[in-house]
Amino acid sequence: LNNIYALTRKKSDQAPEAVLKLSELLSFMLYESRKETIPVSMEMAFLEDYIALERIRYDQRLQISFEKEVQDPSQPIASLLLLPLVENAFKHGASETRFDSFIKIQLKQHESNFHFSIENSFEATKAMAGTERIGLNNIRRQLELLYNDYNLDVNCQENIFNVNLYLNLNSYGKN
């Protein structure tokens, strides 16, 4: 909201788009996020809206790519499962790096196989403290509760932080 407020104060041409994206995010949070599962297409659309809002915020200071390869957009996935991973990339990567910041996201789904990869730049001088791992631990706990068949790989090296999530979407709720 502070970013949108600043855009309106500057009478920026980006303010209406930012308000629209925020409206779409809030609508999703109020009405769709209550559902246990949503179609992969809906989760992707939510992430696209979130990323679009962040693009306005970071402008040219951040290179963002989001590649999608989805065979069945109606395939169900746990609601808001991926958002914490994307938020972490912006919070611990983009907002804390000064130069050559990037976030690369890949989402692939074929039948029940789902792969989500997110990679972001970060400054090694701001090494991850234990408290910053709380988000990843919460995601891991959520996966344990929701999916019987998953793998979450986290790698951190040479100013690049990478998370790979592999899911069998058919294993939802079979714990």
Image (tube, rainbow, N blue to C red):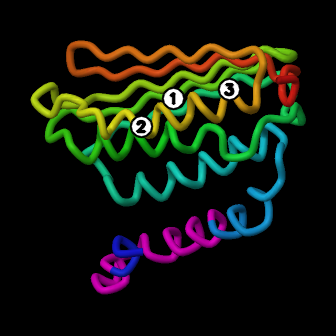
Q: Residues within 10 Å of mark 1 (few under 14, many from 20)?
A: many
The quarter holding residue 149 reads top right
Q: Are marks 2 and 1 in contact (CB under 8 Å)?
A: yes
The local secondary structure at tag 2 comes to strand
The quarter holding residue 124 reads top left
On the picture, is 100 further left or further right than 82? left
- Which residue matches tag 3? 144
- Which residue matches tag 2? 64
On the picture, is 121 further left or further right than 80? left
On the picture, is 119 further left or further right than 37? left
Residue 61 in the image: x percent, y percent? Answer: 25, 46
Q: Residues within 10 Å of mark 2 (few under 14, many from 20)?
A: some
User: Which of disc 1 and disc 2 is earlier in sequence?
Assistant: 2
The local secondary structure at tag 3 comes to helix
- Which residue matches tag 1? 105
On the picture, is 81 further left or further right than 158? right
Task: Tell me where the magenta segment starts and ends, as one range.
Answer: 6-25
Q: CA distance from mark 3 to mark 2?
A: 29 Å
Residue 20 in the image: x percent, y percent? Answer: 59, 71
